[in-house]
Amino acid sequence: MIARPFLSLVAAALLAGCVTHETGSATGIATVSPGYKPDVKTDEAGIWLTADKAEAELLDSANRVRDPAINALVSDMVCKLAAEHCGDLRPYVVRLPHFNATASPNGSISIWSGLLIRARTESELAAVIGHEITHYTRRHSLARIRNARDNTDVAAIFTLLGAAAGMPQVVQLTNVIAVGNIQAFSRDNERESDAEGFNRLVKAGYEPAAAADVWKRILDLRKAKREFEYESYEDRSVRLFVASHPPTEEREKSLRELAEKAAKPTTPPPDRLRQALAGVRLDFLLDEVKLGQFRESKALFELLLKDDPLPGQIHYALGELYRKRAKEDDELVALSHFHQACEAVGAPPEAFRMVGTMRWRRGETEQAKEYFRRYLNAAPNAGDRDLITHYLGS
Amino acid sequence: MTKPFRLALAVLLALSVNACATRTLSTTDKLSREVAQPKILLMPADIELSELTAGGLTELNAEWTLTGQRNLKTALNDHLAKLNARFSEYQTLAQDDPRHDTFLQLQKLHGVTGVNIRTYAFPPAPGLPGKEGKFNWALGPATSMLAESTDAQYALFVWLRDSYTSSGRRAMQIAASLLFGVQLQGGQQIGYASLVDLKTGEIVWFNLLARESGDLRDLASARESVDTLLTGLPK
């Protein structure tokens, strides 16, 4: 019998190509030409239809970020990086707090909020977008679907033969090989996207080192989480076998080598990312807090604090991180971050309210009232104005 | 394909067709006839026609899907005319239309409700404790907005997944049955249809379809599929 759960898992992993997932015309499929649309009779048209449906849902989704500034920036970047394909690509900013971006076969590109707060410069973001654009131009989704079909077909035949010969080992091995082949193919696509994405980055006038830098950051953050320390050698080899993407260390190294050979940009590359994020970043930071990955989030926030123009936001997010973990002395550490937030540039009004509430609970009424007043000063139209006024009057 | 193979296949298919292709839950068997010919609004139908590959992957076929969507509408229109009801189709509003969000949320709500009815309301599922065995599901009063906006009395929701056995898959099926007497999964038609009274927001009829036959790719077969899908629709 065919291992159905196995196959459906594989099928589920197939559709979107993502950054933490798809690289060489190793696929044997031609690059798209501008304005390309597949013939309705082809398997590719089916993939496009699925992608169109997902895009329609995304358009109406509450998770789609509507902020004009960040949307204007990513649209401009996609056009620079995609050159002649600009008109075929539709970028969306999506509120998903993980480091990722995806490109769909029909030209829709999703840029995740978790990526936007991890990229330090516009060039770093451009490196990821360039990678995604390559998934589109090289039609990696189609290649992966065809590859998966071939591999599962062969697996099914060998499963049947193995079962007929009464050799269950053959059956198992066949399916393992299919998954291994499919994932190895996916890793090759990723390498192709890394290489061509890098060319797009350089051609658009961005900083060549940015591609390796962004991966370096991800590695550092993962180490902060001590992910690898807990993973046994065996776990890791299995993971590498089934991984859809090449190891991050390998990607950083190859991109670093490419950057060393590449010409430096003649004019300083644009860096509009921080400004474009002004209206939405606090929400993105607080989404990160909700992930419940204390170590990685703390490492990220501390890294950002080094040169962030709005440290008030970062301190507030750090305060939230400690407050929500609520271990032994966490409340005091949180309170200290909220205080630092209040005195720093970019303090969200909520930081004042948080200090007020925490002090109130500790019985430090006068200090609490001072911060409640500062809160109302900073947010005169706050929805909870009446409640806060009540506190102030008592 | 050779003749004996075809014969073996026909036998297999005949054996596998489920005796009971549809199952219905409803609160009434009559349409409200305040208007002589009630207008039934087809909400954007979620239909996918796919091919089942030899290895068991389901691949969406764009051409079949687009044809299937057209056939469904034609067949539905004719089916409702026979019941002395009017067919109409929901037109998606512009993003900035003040009603857009409400109507979108209604569709999403129905999507979730439909999944719950499918999962919990039909035996062998034990049913949700709070329902006490009753079929009483509703989308709430916001449906009246849809009624006002479209002049319809009912909304019909359709979700359908139709898959067809590829020749490779068929070969696998035959080999599996010859070698082991085992029947591998072939194409299926599964889905549901649901009728909502827009005045009250109640789901008055819900039909579940699951069978290993049926086709939407040509109009004649699509009519048969629609007739089956609408088995027991209030008249």
Image (cartoon, coloured by chain):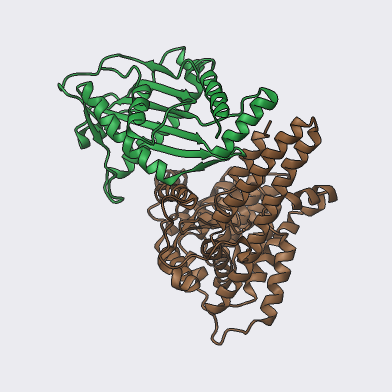
Could you tell me which residue is drawn at 64 percent across and 63 percent down? Answer: A26
The residue closer to the viewer here, B182 or B225, is B182
The residue at the far right in this view is: A233
Rendered location of residue A372, percent (x, y): 49, 52
Rendered location of residue B166, percent (x, y): 53, 38
Rendered location of residue A80, percent (x, y): 47, 74
Could you tell me which residue is drawn at 15 percent across and 23 percent down? Answer: B35
Q: Which chain is green?
A: B
Could you tell me which residue is drawn at 56 percent across and 45 percent down? Answer: A360
Rendered location of residue B85, percent (x, y): 21, 24
The residue closer to the viewer here, B112 or A171, is A171
Q: Is residue B232 left or right of residue A278?
A: left
Chain A tint as drawn: brown
The residue at the far bottom in this view is: A266
**The image quarter in which residue B42 lies:** top left
The residue closer to the viewer here, A16 or A290, is A16
Q: Is residue B120 left or right of residue B38?
A: right
Residue A330 appears in view: yes
Vertically, is A218 above or below B95? Answer: below
Name the quadrant of the N terminus of chain A. top right
The residue at the far left in this view is: B36
**The image quarter in which residue A314 lies:** bottom right
